[in-house]
């Protein structure tokens, strides 16, 4: 009898310990990346690291501003492309799709989320980049912000779709019925009532998609060209900035970590710290917006 | 909100002036706008499915010709040529999946059990939940850096299966916890109460009643995590070493299928057909995993309802 209850207590504490595992891992990640980044933070200085415009490890220049710019550019391009498609698909799934068709679209979205990022990278490298290379712009290699942004748009679609669909589904049925009862068309109800009511969830979906985009690594280094430069237009047409090569924060780590040592390695960890903090900030904001509903279910 | 105020007005106009051609055409215009809007929604959904079809179709069309039984069972040659097949990478993928799940599943299930069965809605639990959600968003390359700093360097595990699976386990932990918790919460309350009423301890109830009912759902989560591990590259790129040889024990490095594909595409002169064929195998694996989780999920739902 007593052994039974002793065992009961023991198990409870074991489970309690494992409940804290995720929090512990999060803390350890922050701790270890910061510790490895420390030499760079001290010797280069956080300000020069963040605002330095040139990354030349051979000459002791460790500015990650080009990578911040690169990450922001590809993220912006991907969200601009993915948002209309993603939101449209989400509204379609929740409001319009006949049951059987929803049964096709939903698994397709799951599969899009499941395809490995190297496969997207391969697709971008062998199909998209040669296609973009045909654009008659001087010094256009095909690799660059546009190629990376398009690949990334496909990759963030599932996040956008699932989270905004959840938000649309959470709109009370009475809103929709009330609107329809006023003699309004279904389309007007969608645009005038349902989408505005789901606004905060949709904004959260966009923010989470941004977080997802900033974190993508392998597909990016395969299509973006990886030059650590602040993107500039290739010709007098400002739009050609999209054909400029760039490097993302994630790519900076992945491209150089294999052969880096000393201060360079530390600077790469500092890049990781910046990325980590940026993502925590972004996902924290999304969680606040989503309130109590589980935010990262995608 | 402005539109919702305007709408009843426009419908009243239509009613009071029924039959007048001008206002009837206003109604027609609304119908037209609705038709155009719905067409856009169909287009968006079609584009989503179409993009998937293009990516998968492109890889399959260009990869299937290069795929053969010999390709699957021949070891890769390594080096710059990118020659040979993919046999060792398939086995290494299996090793890594098993080892990672062996670490993440007990830990994640334990965490889910505590959160679902023991903890109330306390502040501590909210912090834990917040941690899980934040961990789920951390980019995989950061897990890689962490694994490299802690397991590869600090703990001297080197570039090995062990380092890689520890880092990857951290990556999939949130997925395991969340899916396990969901399936535990789907177990009806009456089952627990009936068992406790028979005089069992809490743990006996969990072990004998709750866990067996939640098992199929938890299994779905485990398979889902297996999919994540198969697709993962960034973590492995900085922790697994990348040797094309078969690892003989957990302290050996290696390369999984996804990592091999990355090397083929970026660091070798392997012909495109070989890269594509590797991509086909990878996609086929993911398809298999997705189908089995969907199938399991349906079967489980049918049973509990």
Image: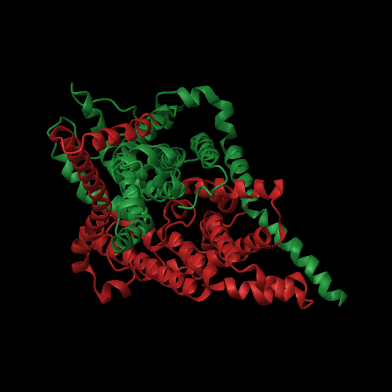
Chain colours: A green, B red
Where is residue A116 drawn, in percent x and y?
36, 56
Using the rendered image of the protein, determine whether residue B267 is visible from the camera's viewpoint: no
Residue shown at the point (24%, 70%) measured from the top left? B67
From the image, which quarter does the N terminus of chain A lie in?
bottom right
Viewer-nearest residue: B29 or B44: B29
Residue shown at the point (68%, 50%) measured from the top left? B125
Relative to A274, A34 lies left or right: right
Where is residue B216 drawn, in percent x and y?
52, 73
Residue shown at the point (43%, 52%) measured from the top left? B237
Viewer-nearest residue: A74 or A67: A74
Relative height, residue A166 to residue A98 (above, below): above
Relative height, residue B70 to residue A44 (above, below): below
Relative to A75, B61 lies left or right: left
Where is residue B24 drawn, in percent x and y?
17, 38
Relative to B275, A298 lies left or right: right
Relative to B64, B96 lies left or right: right
Relative height, residue B185 to residue A130 (above, below): below
The furthest residue to the right? A2
Where is residue B1 drawn, in percent x and y?
40, 31
Residue shown at the point (56%, 53%) measured from the top left? B152
* Number of numbered discs on residues: 0
Using the rendered image of the protein, determine whether residue A281 is visible from the camera's viewpoint: yes
Viewer-nearest residue: A38 or A240: A240
Relative height, residue B277 to residue A51 (above, below): below
């Amino acid at each position: 009898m007593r052994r039974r209850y002793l065992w009961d207590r023991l198990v409870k504490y074991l489970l309690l310990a494992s409940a804290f595992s995720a929090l512990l891992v999060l803390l350890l990640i922050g701790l270890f990346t910061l510790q490895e980044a420390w030499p760079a933070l001290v010797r280069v200085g956080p300000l020069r690291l963040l605002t330095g415009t040139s990354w030349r490890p051979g000459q002791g220049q460790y500015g990650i501003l080009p990578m911040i710019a690169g990450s922001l550019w590809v993220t912006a391009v991907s969200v601009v492309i993915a948002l209309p498609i993603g939101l449209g698909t989400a509204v379609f799934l929740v409001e319009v799709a006949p049951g059987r068709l929803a049964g096709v679209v939903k698994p397709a979205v799951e599969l899009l989320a499941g395809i490995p990022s190297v496969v997207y990278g391969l697709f971008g490298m062998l199909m998209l980049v040669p296609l973009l290379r045909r654009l008659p712009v001087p010094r256009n290699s095909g690799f660059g912000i546009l190629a990376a942004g398009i690949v990334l748009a496909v990759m963030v679609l599932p996040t956008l779709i699932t989270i905004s669909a959840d938000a649309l589904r959470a709109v009370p049925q009475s809103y929709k019925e009330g609107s329809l009862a006023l003699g309004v068309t279904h389309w007007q109800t969608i645009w005038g009532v349902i989408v505005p009511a789901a606004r905060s969830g949709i904004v959260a979906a966009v923010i989470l998609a941004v977080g997802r985009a900033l974190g993508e690594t392998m597909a990016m280094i395969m299509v973006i060209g990886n030059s650590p430069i602040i993107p500039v237009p290739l010709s007098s047409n400002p739009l050609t900035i999209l054909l400029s090569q760039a490097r993302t924060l994630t790519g900076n780590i992945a491209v150089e970590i294999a052969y880096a040592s000393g201060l360079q390695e530390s600077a790469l960890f500092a890049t990781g710290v910046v990325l980590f903090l940026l993502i925590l900030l972004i996902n924290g904001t999304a969680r606040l917006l989503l309130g109590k509903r589980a935010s990262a279910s995608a | 909100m402005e539109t919702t105020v305007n709408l009843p007005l426009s419908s009243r106009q239509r009613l009071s002036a029924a039959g007048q051609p001008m206002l009837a055409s206003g109604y027609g215009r609304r119908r037209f706008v609705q038709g155009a809007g719905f067409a856009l929604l169909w287009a968006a959904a079609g584009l989503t499915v179409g993009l998937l079809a293009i990516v998968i179709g492109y890889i399959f069309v260009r990869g299937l010709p290069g795929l053969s039984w010999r390709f699957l069972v021949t070891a890769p040659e390594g080096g710059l040529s990118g020659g040979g097949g993919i046999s060792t990478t398939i086995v290494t993928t299996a090793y890594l999946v098993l080892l990672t799940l062996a670490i993440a599943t007990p830990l994640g299930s334990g965490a889910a059990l505590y959160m679902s069965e023991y903890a109330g809605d306390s502040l501590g639990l909210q912090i834990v939940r917040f941690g899980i959600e934040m961990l789920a968003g951390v980019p995989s390359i950061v897990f890689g850096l962490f694994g490299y700093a802690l397991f590869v360097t600090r703990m001297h595990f080197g570039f090995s299966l062990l380092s890689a699976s520890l880092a990857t386990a951290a990556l999939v932990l949130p997925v395991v916890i969340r899916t396990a918790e969901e399936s535990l919460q789907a177990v009806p309350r009456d089952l627990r109460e009936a068992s406790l009423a028979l005089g069992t301890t809490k743990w006996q109830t969990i072990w004998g009643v709750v866990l067996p009912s939640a098992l199929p759902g938890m299994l779905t989560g485990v398979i889902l995590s297996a999919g994540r591990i198969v697709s993962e590259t960034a973590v492995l790129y900085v922790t697994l070493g990348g040797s094309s040889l078969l690892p003989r024990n957990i302290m050996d490095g290696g390369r999984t299928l996804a990592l091999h594909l990355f090397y083929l595409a970026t660091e070798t002169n392997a012909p495109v057909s070989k890269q594509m064929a590797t991509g086909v195998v990878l996609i086929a694996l993911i398809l298999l995993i997705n189908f089995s989780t969907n199938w399991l999920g349906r079967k489980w739902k049918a049973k509990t309802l």
